[in-house]
Image (cartoon, rainbow, N blue to C red):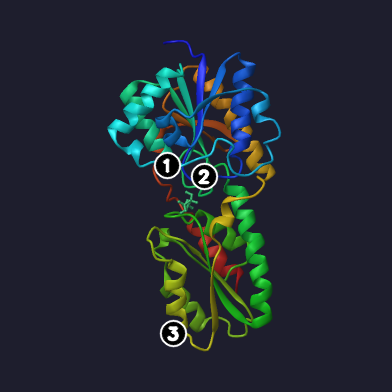
């Protein structure tokens, strides 16, 4: 096995608070072990165009508390094509990079799995996405910050909902995953949660609105965004308005505010732990795996498994919402 001397580091897919803390941990751990780190800007796009630069101790100072990613990020269509990956490999060789650490979500891991297999490059991944939809880690970097951003926003909406006696349908991020909706719904005391994993069960919501307590002054329903182009929240809002015209219903989409802001302590610590483990794993000979935390212990999961959408929604969590919002 060739010795690793120069690690290429990049972030890819949607940014997530805590990615900077992970970048810092990787750079500082690599320097501690006398390795070089080459930063690759804008994910696979920068890998293809050769946007590489040498990172040092100072390039990661004062970033642990900052949201976003100093390496920038992108979603790359070019990289899905063999010519794109070939071009990326040429740049990797040109800059003498002999291993990669990728910080991102399921799309990133599918990309690096292919690249690693095609060109025999040692690659380790870190779970960086607000969605918390990866297998092999209890939490992804950015999720804790995002759910705290959501509950702060929902608490504010509750104030106005309560003042106007309104029902609010609030859409949160998570593409095809209801993880953000589930936890924030519980934490914000929502009256209902509609998520892709339970097929946006509107009948259940209608039943509660029809037969539940009538003296409620405000109601909050959290909706996971789902995969389609059209907003799920507006679709559900229209159905609620039609069936319950006496309810004063409003729809609110929280949007990209959920991806920004200072990472929470949880996210900074998670990012730091997995960042250190990623470098040391490469040195110990690990390849093609994501480093996560399971039951508070470092755990390794092959990319192809980690990238599988985590649909393990605990039905008890959904039940809790209904019981507690009686
Ligand atoms: O993957 C993270 C995520 O924020 C999803 O929750 C959301 O569906 C998507 O990215 C939004 O992507 P974009 O940044 O392309 O609008």
In the rendered image, which residue does mark 1 sit on? 106
Closest to the observer, 162 or 205: 162
In the image, residue 248 lies at what x, y percent? 56, 83
Q: In which image quadrant can residue 267 be found?
A: top right
Q: CA distance from mark 2 to mark 3?
A: 37 Å
Element at label 2: loop
Tag 1 and tag 2, C-beta contact below 8 Å: yes
Other residues around mark 1 within 10 Å, as few (<14) / some (14–19) / many (≥20): many
Other residues around mark 3 within 10 Å, as few (<14) / some (14–19) / many (≥20): few
In the rendered image, which residue does mark 2 sit on? 129
In the image, residue 324 lies at what x, y percent? 61, 68
Tag 1 and tag 3, C-beta contact below 8 Å: no
Q: In which image quadrant can residue 25 be found?
A: top right
Outermost residue toward the top in this view: 2
**In this view, 177 is above or below 108:** below
Q: CA distance from mark 1 to mark 3?
A: 38 Å
Other residues around mark 2 within 10 Å, as few (<14) / some (14–19) / many (≥20): many
Residue at position x 41%, y 23% in the image: 91
**In this view, 12 is above or below 259:** above
Closest to the observer, 169 or 63: 63
Sequence-wise, which precedes: disc 1 or disc 3? 1
In the rendered image, which residue does mark 3 sit on? 243
Sequence-wise, which precedes: disc 1 or disc 2? 1
Horizontal side, residue 243 vs residue 34: left or right: left
Tell whether circle 2 marks a residue whose Cβ is less than 8 angstroms from ligand 1. Answer: yes
């Amino acid at each position: 096995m060739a010795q690793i001397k120069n690690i290429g580091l990049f972030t890819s897919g949607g940014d997530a608070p805590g990615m900077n803390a992970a970048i810092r941990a990787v750079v500082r751990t690599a320097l501690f072990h006398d390795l070089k780190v080459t930063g690759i800007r804008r994910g696979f796009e920068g890998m293809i165009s050769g946007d590489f630069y040498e990172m040092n101790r100072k390039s990661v100072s004062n970033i642990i508390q900052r949201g976003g990613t100093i390496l920038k990020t992108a979603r790359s269509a070019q990289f899905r094509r063999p010519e794109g990956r070939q071009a990326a490999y040429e740049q990797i060789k040109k800059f003498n990079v002999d291993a990669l650490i990728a910080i991102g979500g399921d799309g990133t891991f599918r990309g690096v799995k292919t690249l690693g297999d095609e060109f025999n490059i040692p690659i380790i991944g870190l779970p960086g996405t607000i969605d918390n939809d990866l297998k092999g880690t209890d939490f992804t970097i950015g999720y804790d910050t995002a759910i705290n951003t959501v509950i702060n926003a929902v608490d504010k909406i509750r104030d106005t909902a309560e003042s106007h006696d309104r029902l609010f349908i609030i859409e949160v991020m998570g593409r095809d995953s209801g993880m953000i909706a589930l936890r924030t719904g519980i934490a914000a005391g929502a009256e209902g949660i509609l998520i892709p994993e339970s097929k946006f069960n509107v009948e259940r919501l209608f039943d509660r609105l029809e037969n539940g307590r009538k003296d409620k002054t405000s109601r909050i329903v959290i909706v996971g965004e789902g995969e389609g182009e059209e907003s799920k929240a507006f679709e559900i809002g229209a159905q609620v308005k039609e069936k319950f015209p006496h309810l004063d219903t409003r729809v609110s989409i929280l949007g990209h505010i959920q991806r920004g802001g200072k990472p929470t302590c949880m996210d900074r610590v998670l990012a730091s732990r997995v960042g250190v483990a990623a470098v040391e794993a490469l040195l110990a000979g690990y390849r093609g795996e994501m480093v996560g935390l399971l039951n508070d212990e470092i755990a390794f999961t092959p990319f192809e498994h980690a990238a599988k959408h985590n649909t393990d929604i605990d039905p008890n969590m959904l039940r809790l919402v209904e019981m507690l919002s009686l």
